């Protein structure tokens, strides 16, 4: 009897293992053959699931987006105010600092090897960015995409500062300060609005 393979689950398992390979070698340096070797699969198997290294990376970005949003919402569970939510965000960043630094490094390396115009028009990255912005709106309890973009930029900036070795950055302290600033800016939005992402 042939072995039944859940192809979607197997594809996700391969993607999760690719994260560490990209973190170790960098997007620009690693080849599909090296990825296949690192995963312990044939190049044919790898190409069956991912037609190119860029397609693999795009699927990885989508998978990471969904995992990030799910984990962030779980961390936010129980926060009743915007301030509590921002403090929960700080704890989440502290708990996952190494992961976020690695993902930022991988993302920067990927961007270095892409045409900027193609990056801006890439539908996969547009969708993932929209998902992150939607989550930020939900997280802050507002419908203002500009403010959501600001919150995302703030978090990304903190992570970049850590990546560059700034040891003075304290995620908890910075997120608490952002919470105070947002609460002052949005006095009518003190309670967190819960909704599905």
Image (cartoon, rainbow, N blue to C red):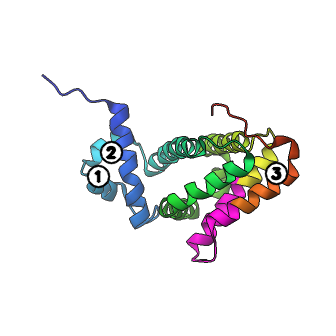
Instruction: Name the secondary structure under disc 1.
Output: helix
**Is 69 drawn above or below residue 98 in the view shown?**
above
> How far apart in space, not on screen, are marks 3 and 1 (Cα)?
46 Å
Q: Quadrant of the C terminus?
A: top right
Q: Mark 2 or mark 3: which is in front?
A: 3
Residue at label 2? 46
> How far apart in space, not on screen, are marks 2 and 3 (Cα)?
48 Å
Q: Mark 1 or mark 2: which is in front?
A: 1
Predominant SS of the magenta segment: helix
Q: Which region shows up in magenta?
A: 152-175
- Residue at the location (69% across, 43% down)? 139
Residue at label 3? 183
Q: Quadrant of the N terminus?
A: top left
Q: Is residue 114 in sight in this rendering?
A: no
Q: Horizontal and vertical percent for residue 16?
A: 39, 48
- Residue at the location (62% across, 64% down)? 171
Q: Would you say residue 163 sits in the magenta stretch?
A: yes
> How far apart in space, not on screen, are marks 1 and 2 (Cα)?
9 Å
Q: Mark 3 or mark 1: which is in front?
A: 3
Q: Horizontal and vertical percent for residue 12?
A: 39, 40
Residue at label 1? 39
Q: Horizontal and vertical percent for residue 30?
A: 39, 62
Which quarter of the picture shows residue 135?
top right
């Amino acid at each position: 009897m042939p072995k039944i393979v859940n192809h979607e689950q197997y594809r996700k398992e391969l993607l999760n293992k690719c994260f560490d390979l990209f973190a170790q070698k960098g997007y620009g340096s690693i080849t599909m053959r090296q990825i296949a070797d690192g995963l312990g699969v044939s190049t044919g198997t790898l190409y069956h699931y991912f037609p190119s290294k860029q397609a693999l990376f795009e699927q990885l970005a989508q998978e990471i987006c969904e995992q990030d949003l799910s984990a962030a919402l779980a961390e936010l569970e129980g926060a009743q105010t915007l301030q509590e939510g921002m403090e929960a965000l700080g704890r989440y960043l502290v708990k996952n600092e190494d992961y976020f630094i690695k993902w930022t490094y991988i993302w920067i390396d990927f961007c270095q090897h892409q045409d900027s115009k193609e990056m801006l028009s890439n539908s996969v990255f547009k969708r993932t960015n929209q998902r992150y912005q939607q989550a930020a709106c939900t997280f802050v309890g507002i419908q203002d995409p500009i403010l959501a973009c600001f919150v995302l930029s703030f978090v990304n900036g903190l992570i970049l500062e850590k990546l560059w070795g700034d040891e003075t950055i304290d995620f908890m302290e910075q997120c608490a300060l952002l919470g105070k600033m947002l609460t002052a800016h949005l006095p009518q939005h003190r309670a967190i609005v819960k909704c599905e992402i």
